Image: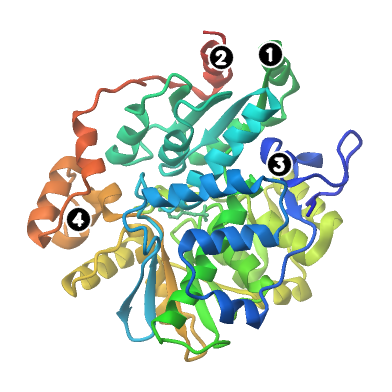
Amino acid sequence: MNFIETRGNEAGFDTEVAFSYALLNPSASFGGLYIPKTLPKLEAEFIANNHDLSYKDLAYKILKMFEIDIKDEVLQEALALYDRFDNVADTTPVVKIAEDLFVNELYHGPTRAFKDMALQPFGHILSDLAKKSGKKYLILAATSGDTGPATLDTFANKENIQVVCLYPDGGTSDVQRLQMVTEEGKNLKVIGIHGNFDDAQSALKTLLASNTFKEELQKNHISLSAANSVNFGRIILQIVYHIKSYFSLLNQGEIKEGEKIYITVPSGNFGNALGAYYAKKMGLPIAKILIASNANNVLTDLILKGKYDIRDRKLILTNSPAMDILKSSNVERVLFDKFGAQRTKDFMSSLNKENHYELTKTELEALQEDFDAVFCDDAYGQEIIKKYADNGYIMDPHTATCLKADETLKTEDLKNVICSTAEWTKFAPTMLNALNKDDKKYSDLEALESISKALNIEITPSVSVLFDKKVLHDKIVEKESIEEEILKFINQ
Ligand SMILES: *Cc1c(COP(=O)(O)O)cnc(C)c1O
């Protein structure tokens, strides 16, 4: 199956490209994104016949339905990386935490956030393509804390790939920062920047579009690619776990075939939510996708009022930093799907030039057929963490934003599956504040140890060892110096 572009076609770009091309060259015409030309259908028969497959076998079947140009053997090797997760027999446990309420635990991979769900196999597929093409690729990743570690982990020491990872200094937890700055691999470079995640992401987008930068790279025979969720290679892998969660409910006897469910997603760049949207379009019985935001509630305004407006907004640093985003890249793919390329191009250029765009009433209604939204502030999130911990279930601050959606948005008496995007160990100081109902400044290490003792739970070994590892990347620079730093790394 081929891929087309969200903002229409520009001279010099092919009107359709193969999956492998979109992976290696994620930036499409006019700065747009690639999307599949059509979506495969999940027939009732598919659900009936495949609900007891293992995670990786299900992933394989679904990827095959997209008819992508990746060899079977490579796909199998890539999906075998799910064996690195905690439990091979249950890669993404779906846990019941209350009546009609379930958590899809997506964080059991090597870096303890759901980014591993896509980035583990994605890294293998991309490295293989790079190696076979005989070209060298530079992967630029901007991270608010979880993409960075997952990208570095998947690409460490891979041939023909170099990775530069930009993170906002002070915008991540100690665990997240240590996961990045202690990562070994000669092909990796981690740079902290003075600024927030949006600054890091805009710097990345500017570089991806910069011809002078590309020319510098070409001198070194290096092409650019991206591992952020602008890359469809990540999105395709994020469709699978939503389908898997439905199958888990079937297998647990919680729902009957065809019964609708809600899926609730704590959203930032909207990659996770987009995966759910595609699953719904493919035919998974989803009543609605509930979008949880934090105080940076741009998505809430879009879905409730049809207005994407960041003119008077400043990014707020919250307890759920992976959702501290104002420009949410993957919304574009939904706009394209509903309103077409011309309209999407207009929306995006309005957003880039004037920092806002607005849907018509009919367009808003079309969006609301699939989505509803609410935001959750830090104080409420903290209460939720405490309430569930007291009942024996530990959820991280991102996951906690979903409970407000469960409490306020359901209009039908259906089961709700909340996506849990990170393990508590990545945000231990916030967790301890919630449990102790205080706002003291704890270090990650003391918070981890204190929670571990109080709740009698183990600190995940891959997290506790971080504190004894050597820091290998200590650069923190101004935004203006990023390009120079990257070129230094490439030319070394
Ligand atoms: C990345 C991330 C999110 C946001 O996911 P998107 O796909 O960008 O919307 C939410 N929670 C955590 C813990 C994350 O790492």
Dot 3, crowdedness within 10 Å: few (<14), some or many (≥20)? Answer: many
Q: Residue 458 shows which numbered tag?
A: none
> Where residue 418 appears, x then y in whole percent?
42, 70
Kindly tell me whether residue 75 is visible in this rendering. Answer: yes
Q: Residue 490 shows which numbered tag?
A: 2
Dot 2, crowdedness within 10 Å: few (<14), some or many (≥20)? Answer: some
* Kind of residue at badge 2: Ile
Q: Nearer the viewer, mark 4 or mark 3?
A: 3
Residue situated in front as seen by the camera: 212 or 73: 73
Are circles 2 and 1 on residues that touch, CB within 8 Å? yes
Q: Earlier in the sequence, mark 2 or mark 4?
A: 4
Q: Is residue 174 above or below residue 436?
A: above
Q: Earlier in the sequence, mark 4 or mark 3?
A: 3
Q: Within 8 Å: ligand 1 and the Cβ of disc 3?
A: no
* Label 3 residue SS: helix
Residue drawn at the location 40% of the way across and 73% of the way down: 404
Are circles 1 and 4 on residues that touch, CB within 8 Å? no
Q: Which residue is mark 4?
A: 433
Mark 3–mark 1 Cα distance, whole angstroms, equals 24 Å
Q: Which residue is mark 3?
A: 20
